[in-house]
């Protein structure tokens, strides 16, 4: 039985042979899809194709504006394109009801700060979920968030201003989950506190280069925050190295990543949920050594609940200068994974040992290298084997392994003293890799020593 | 009824110029317009006229669907096919196929053609795009000048 469908209302015939402007007959959704695949500049230009196209681009949901204003534009003949862009965005914000994601990136200095403030104000009236505002070049403008405005739908906010930021009372971000602030100078201390307390559901915060001008304290008090990343380079600091404080009061914080100058004083409060911490304190000036050491102790002391801790060489060096007070470190009762990155010296080895003595449940230890003669130093291991060696340590990972005799002795020490050690990971340096006979000898020797109780894994060290 | 439907062996598609294509049911799955007719009927064989699609275009669409419905073809082979498929088309073909895809309600083929078209008009002048789409402007020169000024950022 053959069923035939004749032309019904559903299948409408139109002139297939007529090539005249068949694009404009397509459903708006199809045209918008094509526009969404174009760079935004091309999409805006379709406004002059014909009346039907005039406002079509404003119905897109994602806008990614980027402009570079060159120095040639400073004369009158080519007034600066950044301001043209800001005008265009402002009109878009008046006209459109469909913006979900708006990104405005401006390279170049000659912007009108008032236009930025308008942009933020009108954006607050929209159902925008993701807003990125990035002024790439350093400028002396004051950018103010709109006061008494709630960004009702905003989920993600990225502010890279290179300007001074003022946060007035009444600005709020009731749905904001992710906030990143980069290259910002806070206008005053209130601004540096308010921004983080007006986000009642914030989960992720990234601070990248906030400048210590106008303020002494950045205060992050937020009970929903889960992930905090702080990355400040040395030029962020003010004139006095001991004048910069970051208070972190975040009871639900799970992950903390700190990369900054060690003379920034951290005041950790209530960090009882913390799981992962990366503490990479950079180099410091000799005059602030002791101050920096005490800052590092204070920061680590607030992280006593942590399960996994990653420390840079600089952080350890910093702690080394606090020899006298390092015993003030609390016991890290939950710590199971300790990673020490890069570099090694006698001094920092002692610090690592001091920390290991405070970690009764350590299961995994990664050290950057074995120091020559470290076993000859009575203090280090021989007097008292750390508690975790006897009850919990099961994986040892050594970077930069060269296969020299003192290193083998070091591994042997672990084999003899760490009762539950079941795996040793050796990241071999290229010297060892280049010498395949030596590598084979080392492997045989270690396997013999372990008497089958421990698995050895050899890796290439990727440098 | 479900059993009857699954017993459909061959679908006959009749293009605007009368050319006839016999295809297996899995080939038309992506064509939602066609599929909705098949779903409404409970016959073993169906014949469907598609008065808005030319035979040449329908042949290409079926070729595309066959390739993409095949489970034996690797992802790389399909990508290679897509690349060659677009390469042998003129811009008129792309526009006609986009229209056919819209009419047949074929989501992924529509996206595929839209991407091919977007790649051609990307970074091109308004004049080029007008010409490409064969759009006749209904703006007066004054209106157009006004719009250019309003959206000046995009025209620099």
Image (spheres, coloured by chain):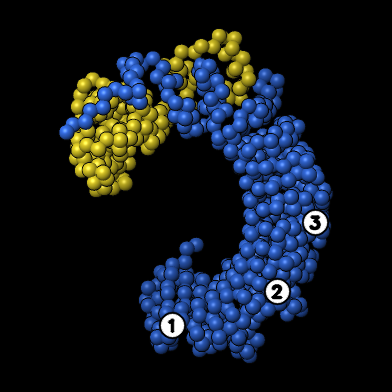
Chain colours: A blue, B yellow
Residue at point 32%, 23% (across, down) = A8
Q: Position of residue A341 (x, y in %)?
A: 58, 68
| Distance between mark 1 and mark 2 Cα atoms | 33 Å
Residue A93 sits in which quadrant? top right
Numbered badge on residue A217: 3
Q: Which callout, 3 or 2, points at the residue further toward the start of the chain?
A: 3
Query: Residue A451 versus residue A72: which sits nearer the camera?
Result: A451
- Locate the N terminus of chain A by quadrant: top left
Disc 2 crowd rating (10 Å Cα; few below 14, some 14-19, many 20+) is many
Residue at point 63%, 89% (across, down) = A384
Q: Position of residue B34 (x, y in %)?
A: 30, 33
Q: Secondary structure at mark 1?
A: loop
Query: Chain ID for label 2?
Result: A
Query: Chain ID for label 1?
Result: A
Residue A270 sits in which quadrant? bottom right
Which residue does the numbered mark 2 point to in the structure image? A320
Residue at point 66%, 53% (across, down) = A202
Residue reaching furthest front? B1
Establish if A399 lies above or below A208. below
Q: Is residue A261 left or right of residue A2?
A: right
Residue reaching furthest left? A1
| Distance between mark 3 and mark 1 Cα atoms | 50 Å
Establish if B60 lies above or below B146. below
Q: Which callout, 1 or 2, points at the residue further toward the start of the chain?
A: 2
Question: Given contact means CB atoms under 8 Å apart, are the residues at marks 3 and 2 in contact?
Answer: no
């Amino acid at each position: 039985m053959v069923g035939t469908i004749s032309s019904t209302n559903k299948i409408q015939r139109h002139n297939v042979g007529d090539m005249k402007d068949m694009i404009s007959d397509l459903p708006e959704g199809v045209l918008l899809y094509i526009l969404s695949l174009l760079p935004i500049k091309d999409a805006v230009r379709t406004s002059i194709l014909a009346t039907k196209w005039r406002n079509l681009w404003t119905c897109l949901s994602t806008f990614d504006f980027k402009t570079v204003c060159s120095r040639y534009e400073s004369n009158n003949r080519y007034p600066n394109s950044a301001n043209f862009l800001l005008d265009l965005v402002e009109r878009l914000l008046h006209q459109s009801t469909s913006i979900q994601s708006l990104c405005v990136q401006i390279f170049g200095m000659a912007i009108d700060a008032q236009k930025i403030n308008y942009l933020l104000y009108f954006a607050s009236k929209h159902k925008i979920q993701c807003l990125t505002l990035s002024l790439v070049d350093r400028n002396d403008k004051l950018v103010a968030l709109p006061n008494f405005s709630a960004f009702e739908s905003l989920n993600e906010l990225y502010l890279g201003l290179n300007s001074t930021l003022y946060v007035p009372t009444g600005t709020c971000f009731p749905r904001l989950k992710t906030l990143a602030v980069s290259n910002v100078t806070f206008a005053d201390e209130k601004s540096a506190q308010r921004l983080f307390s007006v986000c009642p559901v914030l989960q992720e915060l990234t601070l990248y280069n906030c400048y210590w001008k106008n303020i002494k304290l950045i205060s992050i008090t937020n009970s929903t925050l889960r992930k905090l990343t702080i990355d400040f380079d040395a030029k962020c600091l003010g004139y006095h190295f001991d004048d910069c404080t970051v208070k972190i009061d975040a009871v639900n914080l799970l992950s903390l990543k700190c990369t900054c100058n060690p003379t920034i004083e951290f005041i950790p409060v209530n960090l009882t949920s913390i799981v992962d911490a990366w503490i990479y304190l950079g180099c410091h000036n000799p005059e602030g050594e002791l101050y920096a050491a005490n800052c590092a102790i204070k920061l680590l002391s607030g992280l006593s609940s942590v399960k996994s801790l990653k420390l840079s060489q600089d952080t350890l060096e910093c702690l080394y200068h606090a020899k006298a007070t390092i015993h003030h470190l609390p016991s890290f009762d939950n710590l199971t994974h300790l990673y020490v990155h890069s570099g090694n010296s006698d001094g920092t080895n002692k610090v690592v040992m001091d920390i290991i003595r405070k970690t009764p449940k350590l299961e995994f230890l990664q050290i950057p290298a074995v120091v020559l003669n470290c076993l000859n130093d009575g203090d280090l291991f021989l007097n008292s084997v750390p508690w975790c060696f006897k009850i919990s340590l099961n994986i040892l990972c050594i970077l930069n392994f060269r296969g020299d005799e003192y290193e083998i002795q070091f591994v042997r020490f672990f084999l003899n003293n760490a009762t539950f050690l079941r795996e040793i990971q050796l990241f071999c340096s290229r010297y060892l890799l280049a010498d395949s006979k030596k590598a084979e000898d080392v492997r045989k020797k270690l396997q013999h020593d372990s008497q089958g109780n421990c698995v050895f894994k050899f890796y290439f060290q990727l440098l | 009824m479900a059993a009857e439907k699954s017993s459909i062996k061959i679908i006959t598609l009749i293009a605007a110029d009368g050319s006839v294509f016999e295809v297996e049911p899995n080939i038309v799955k992506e064509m939602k317009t066609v599929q909705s007719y098949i779903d409404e009927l409970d016959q073993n064989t169906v014949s469907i006229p598609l008065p808005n699609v030319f035979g040449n275009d329908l042949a290409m669409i079926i070729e595309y669907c066959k390739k993409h419905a095949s489970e034996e073809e690797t992802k790389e082979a399909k990508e290679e096919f897509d690349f060659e498929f677009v390469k042998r088309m003129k811009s008129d073909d792309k526009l006609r196929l986009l229209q056919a895809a819209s009419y047949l309600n074929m989501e992924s083929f529509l996206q595929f053609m839209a991407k091919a078209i977007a790649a051609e008009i990307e970074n091109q002048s308004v004049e080029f795009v007008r010409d490409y789409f064969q759009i006749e402007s209904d703006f007066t020169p004054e209106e157009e000048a006004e719009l250019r000024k309003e959206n000046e950022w995009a025209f620099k």
